């Protein structure tokens, strides 16, 4: 299913590159990223069912002959387009809407948040450049697309020795009504040494049939020496939303990182997270909840790399499948030869609410050090009949018992999220997304 350069679909997307400049003169290093992304997009094939890591991923919704994708860059953010549950619970510090960016806090003693373009004009170009210099070349066309369309992004910088008490909320809106629209949001978060912060990023999407929105999002997170970050992202949108979602994380010596993710709605979600533990005595916690329904597809690919020793990582991920949905989890813990005394636990639990719902899980370990503690496990199944029977013996009807078990399954993972507003946020979504 490889689409070559001559294919109309690639030509349409490559031609859109010419429209992203809008009079802005990109520095040489940025030009290189755009050009390198376009070159990779030309030559890399589209993954198929024979490609390692993509065997359960159906990409036809992206490359259907009926789709005529176009990149749209808005000139202004319209805050009224933000879903009410996001706006009320996580009032945004910065907003992205199809490339238009609005920031409420431009520059303060405790943090800096702005667009990539304005950050360069305000003297932060060297920091951004140094971060992108460490980025790997695109491994597949979705990563290449993010680079070749990187016309802007949101840059959040927490300086050394800075503790930000109030959470920082970012909202990403992707909209398209009269055309099949591509949006390429990019978020770069950098906590310098000894900094502390809580950051939430919320992705919403809106479109109307017969058109779709393709959201190709990229997050890059750098946590410096002895820095501490609590991070949450949430994904929701219409049933015509297709998402590729990539998060890369670099953790410095003695840092801590809590990553929490909610996949709440959308036709297609593939999420990749790559965490590199680059220093000793690092603590990393990853929590996630996927709620899937209809004929929707959700896939999570995780790679946690212990590159130095004395690090601790914990993964607790849950998936809830309804109707004819398909949920896929692939997680790998990698322990390098120099990562002695590493301690890692990986756990996935899936709850299937329909005989037609599919939940596949494959946790993996790849260990090259001999003095480590690593465990992994996965369980998938329907609400336990013996527990439903137990509730019935206490006078609780089967439907109510089933509802209580579903709520318990969800609440158990939410209790591990370190951001207290999450339960209220998810409860609002549950009323729409979960048929109890």
Image: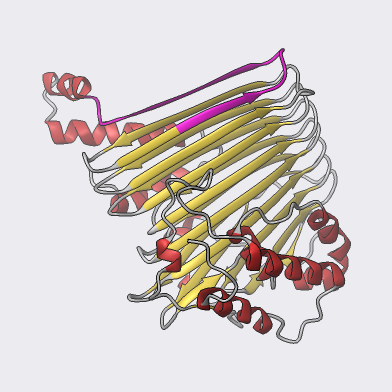
Q: Quadrant of residue 101?
A: bottom right
The residue shown at (35%, 63%) is 239
In x, y percent, where is residue 85? 43, 59
In the foreground, 88 or 186: 186
Residue stretch rendered in magenta on the structure: 362-384
- Is residue 246 shown above or below 277? below
- Whether 377 is among the magenta residues is yes
Which image quarter holds the C terminus? top left
Main SS, magenta residues: strand
Q: Is residue 405 left or right of residue 147?
A: left
Residue 179 in percent (x, y) is at 44, 81
User: Is residue 289 in view from this perspective?
Assistant: yes
- Magenta-span inclusion, residue 255: no
Q: Picture coordinates of residue 196 (x, y %)?
A: 74, 42
Scheme of image coloration: secondary structure
Relative image position of residue 420 (x, y in whole percent): 51, 41
**Which of these two is toward me, 249 or 393?**
249
Residue at the image point whose x is 42% and y is 46% from the top: 56
**Up/down of 72 relative to 322, above or below:** below
Q: Is residue 89 left or right of residue 113?
A: left
Image point (39%, 39%), residue name: 319
> In the rendered image of this protein, does residue 72 appear above or below residue 365?
below
Q: Residue at x 76, y 66 (%)?
A: 33
Most foreground residue, 91 or 1: 1
**Residue farthest along the top direction in this orientation:** 371
């Amino acid at each position: 299913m490889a689409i070559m350069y001559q294919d109309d679909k690639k030509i349409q997307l490559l031609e859109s590159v010419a429209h992203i400049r809008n009079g802005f003169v990109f520095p040489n290093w940025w030009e290189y990223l755009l050009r390198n992304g376009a070159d990779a997009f030309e030559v890399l094939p589209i993954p198929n069912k024979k490609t390692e890591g993509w065997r359960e991923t159906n990409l036809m919704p992206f490359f259907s002959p009926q789709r005529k994708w176009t990149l749209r860059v808005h000139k202004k953010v319209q805050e009224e387009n933000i879903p009410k549950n996001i706006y009320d619970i996580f009032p945004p510090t910065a907003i992205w809407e199809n490339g238009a960016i609005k920031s409420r806090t431009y520059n303060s003693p405790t943090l800096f948040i702005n667009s990539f373009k304005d950050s360069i004009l305000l003297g932060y170009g060297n920091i951004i450049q140094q971060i992108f210099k460490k980025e790997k070349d695109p491994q597949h066309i979705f990563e290449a697309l993010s680079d070749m369309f990187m016309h802007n992004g949101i840059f959040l910088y927490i300086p050394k020795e800075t503790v930000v008490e109030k959470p920082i909320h970012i909202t990403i809106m992707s909209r398209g009504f009269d055309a099949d629209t591509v949006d390429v949001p990019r978020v770069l978060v950098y906590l310098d040494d000894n900094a502390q912060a809580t950051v939430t990023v919320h992705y919403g999407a809106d479109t109307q049939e017969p058109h779709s929105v393709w959201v190709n999002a990229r997050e890059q997170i750098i946590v410096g020496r002895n820095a501490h970050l609590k991070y949450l992202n949430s994904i929701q949108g219409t049933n015509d939303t297709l998402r590729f979602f990539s998060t890369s994380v670099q953790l410095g010596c003695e840092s801590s990182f809590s990553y929490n993710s909610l996949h709440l709605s959308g036709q297609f979600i593939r999420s990749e997270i790559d965490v590199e533990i680059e220093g000793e005595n690092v603590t990393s916690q990853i929590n996630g909840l996927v709620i899937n329904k209809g004929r929707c597809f959700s896939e999570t690919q995780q790679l946690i790399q212990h590159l130095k020793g004395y690090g601790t990582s914990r993964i607790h991920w849950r998936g809830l499948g309804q109707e004819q949905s398909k949920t896929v989890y692939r997680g790998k813990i990698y322990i390098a030869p120099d990562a002695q005394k590493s301690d890692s636990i990986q756990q996935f639990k899936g709850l299937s609410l329909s005989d037609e719902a599919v939940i596949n899980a494959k946790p993996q370990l790849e260990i090259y050090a001999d003095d480590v503690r690593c465990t992994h496990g996965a369980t998938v199944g329907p609400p336990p009949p013996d527990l439903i029977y137990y509730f019935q013996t206490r006078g609780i009807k089967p439907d109510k018992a089933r509802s209580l078990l579903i709520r318990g399954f969800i609440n158990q993972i939410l209790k591990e999220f370190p951001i207290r507003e999450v339960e209220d946020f998810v409860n609002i979504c549950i009323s729409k997304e979960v048929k109890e």
